[in-house]
Image (tube, rainbow, N blue to C red):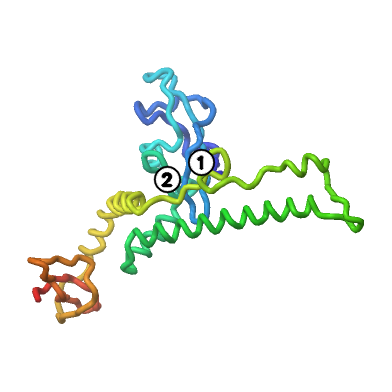
Amino acid sequence: MIFYAPFDLRGPYRPFCPSCGSVEVNADGWSTFRRVIDRQECIFTICGRYRCTKKHKNACFLSWDAELFEKAPPLVRMAFPVIFTHRLGVTQIVFDYMRSWSEGGSGFGTFADYMRENHTRHDHSKELAYMGRLADLMAEGPLGEVRVAGCSTETASNFTGFSAFSDPDGYGGVHGSKNFYRSVYTRGMRLLEPLMKQRCAMVPARMLSGDHFFKILKCKFKFKGRPLFMAAYSLVNEHTEDMATVLTQT
């Protein structure tokens, strides 16, 4: 569970209305719970809710509003390591895993399988702990009687089993699909695109060498059933950094 109350942190960052900019706002309770996919399980987040009392009287806003989050100092932003989607969200560490995963050449289908395995394993470990506790409560004594700690024998014998992974009233596990992770990655990298272009613009543009390479290309095109590109030609600068990569026809 993540409780996000950025205005309770010590510092100059104070609440203001994202619509009119007024600082005349009052605390108005908490938001509803939002489900977020973490590396091993789903967690829930909740944030402070505020009400504007000036131009937008009786208008409520949440402390994780996009405009507030954009103007917050780094310390406040890092206190809420969550990236929201329309209905779900992922933690920052999951997004970082996706970046490393894609840089290694793996697709989002394998990443979704990896996340499903992590969540399922965590669910099984909780079920094992639960069943171990029941076995301890229902253990037989030295004379064959059922030894029950803290409850009657009838109550212990009627304990329910551990809920299924997808049971919304029980464990309620969600691990995400490949399309979900692809959309999260695309939107997150789009926000980083200006910084990446700025970094590329600072790289010296003097070409020193070029060479073919025959690594497996991510984009394979076929023309009348035959592959159109089998290799690529790369140009590097004096820092051995790739400046350009051009697909080469077969």
Which residue, as the protein is rendered here, is positioned at the far right? 143
Percent from the top left, x then y, of residue 38?
A: 49, 52
Asked whether 89 or 150 is in front, the reply is 150
Q: CA distance from mark 1 to mark 2?
A: 10 Å
Which residue, as the protein is rendered here, is positioned at the far front? 144
Q: Quadrant of the C terminus?
A: bottom left
Q: Is residue 85 visible?
A: yes
Give the structural element (helix, strand or loop) at label 1. strand
Percent from the top left, x then y, of residue 43?
A: 52, 46
Give the structural element (helix, strand or loop) at label 2. strand
Image quarter of residue 233: bottom left
> Does 101 appear above or below 92?
below
Crowding near the residue tagged with mark 2, few <14, some 14–19, many ≥20 C-alpha atoms within 10 Å: many
Q: Is residue 133 left or right of residue 240?
A: right
The reply to whether the C-beta atoms of the residues labelled 1 and 2 are less than 8 Å apart is: yes
Q: Is residue 4 visible?
A: no
Q: Residue at x 29, y 52 (%)?
A: 186
Percent from the top left, x then y, of residue 240?
A: 24, 78
Q: Earlier in the sequence, mark 1 or mark 2?
A: 1
Asked whether 162 or 181 is in front, the reply is 162
> Does 67 appear above or below 129?
above
Residue of label 1: 45
> Does 139 appear above or below 44?
below
Q: Residue at x 35, y 49 (%)?
A: 180
Asked whether 217 or 64 is in front, the reply is 217
Residue of label 2: 89
What amino acid does circle 1 point to?
Thr
Percent from the top left, x then y, of residue 193?
A: 26, 55
What amino acid does circle 2 point to?
Gly
Q: Quadrant of the N terminus?
A: top right
Image quarter of residue 24: top left
